[in-house]
Amino acid sequence: MPYLTQKVAFSASHFYWNPRFSDDENQRIFGACANTQGHGHNYQVEVCLQGKIDPKTGMVINFFDLEPILAQVILKPLDHQNLNTQVPYFQNKIPTLENIACYIWEHLSPPIRQAGIKLHRIKVIENPSLYVEYDGKADLPC
């Protein structure tokens, strides 16, 4: 079965802070990322889909059908946002790369499934040397 991968990019700010830790402990564990003023990234997300090729269109999914799903699930809620304060999902979760991957997976799976295809894997890239890949299995405690 073929795999189709679409990339989407968004910019967001965040900081790492665990309210159960002391200020010193947050600084020790998270370093510069614990600065509550935040810092930003230009994230890239690769969404890999698996499905049968539609004999009428020759595609797993029409890009014109996929694009609004990605915009609604990823761009609209995350782009140019402070993840800590503007995205309710992160009110009680530290917006680490791993938790961002969980957010995207949890919110993207239902509309992709409704489109009759399978969300195979996502890759969330923070910078060229740091990224998370997730396939929806129990690897991450989402």
Image (spheres, rainbow, N blue to C red):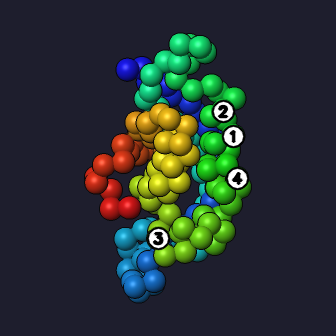
Q: Position of residue 55 (x, y in %)?
A: 53, 13
Q: Check if mark 2's residue and mark 1's residue have beta carbons within 8 Å.
A: yes
The residue depicted at 33 percent of the width and 62 percent of the height is: 141
Q: Please name the residue that numbered disc 3 is placed on.
A: 93
Locate residue 97, reporting x and y percent: 46, 54
| Residue 65: image tag | 2
Residue 76 circle label: 4
The circle on residue 1 is none
Out of 97 and 128, give the one closest to the viewer. 97
**Mark 1 and mark 3 in contact (Cβ < 8 Å)?**
no
Q: Amino acid at mark 3?
A: Lys
Q: Earlier in the sequence, mark 2 or mark 4?
A: 2
Q: Nearer the viewer, mark 1 or mark 4?
A: 1
Element under disc 3 = loop
Check disc 2 and give the amino acid type.
Answer: Asp
In the displayed structure, would residue 37 be above or below residue 49? below
